[in-house]
Amino acid sequence: MAIRPLIFGILFIAALVGIILSIIWVDTSHPVRQPDPLSPTAPGPATPGPVQ
């Protein structure tokens, strides 16, 4: 009987489909690259700090 190769084939195809779906399933409502909140927004003139 060819039950074992059939089961392995079905599992293999299911794994491939799962991998492909996980790659395709990307949330496009959010940008891929988020700006770093700690980075300066624009290199402008340096503001002097408080004088001690």
Image: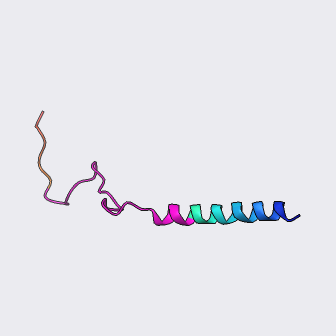
How is colour applied across the structure in the image? rainbow
**Residue 26 is inside the magenta segment:** yes
- Residue sitting at 20 percent across and 57 percent down? 41
Q: Is residue 13 above or below residue 40?
A: below
**Residue 32 is inside the magenta segment:** yes
Front-most of residues 15 and 30: 15
Residue situated furthest top in the rendering: 52
Residue 5 image offset from top left, x and y in percent: 81, 64
Front-most of residues 33 and 18: 18
The tally of labels here is 0
Residue situated furthest front in the rendering: 1
- Residue sitting at 47 percent across and 66 percent down? 24
> In the drawing, does residue 21 fall left or right of residue 27?
right
Q: Is residue 17 above or below residue 37?
A: below
Residue 14 found in image quarter: bottom right
Residue 18 image offset from top left, x and y in percent: 58, 61
> In the drawing, does residue 28 fall left or right of residue 12?
left
- Residue sitting at 15 percent across and 53 percent down? 46
> In the drawing, does residue 9 fall left or right of residue 46?
right
Residue 6 image offset from top left, x and y in percent: 78, 64
- Residue sitting at 82 percent across and 61 percent down? 3
Quadrant in which the C terminus appears: top left
Residue 15 image offset from top left, x and y in percent: 64, 61
Look at the image and give the residue range highlighted in magenta.
20-45
Front-most of residues 14 and 47: 14
Quadrant in which the N terminus appears: bottom right
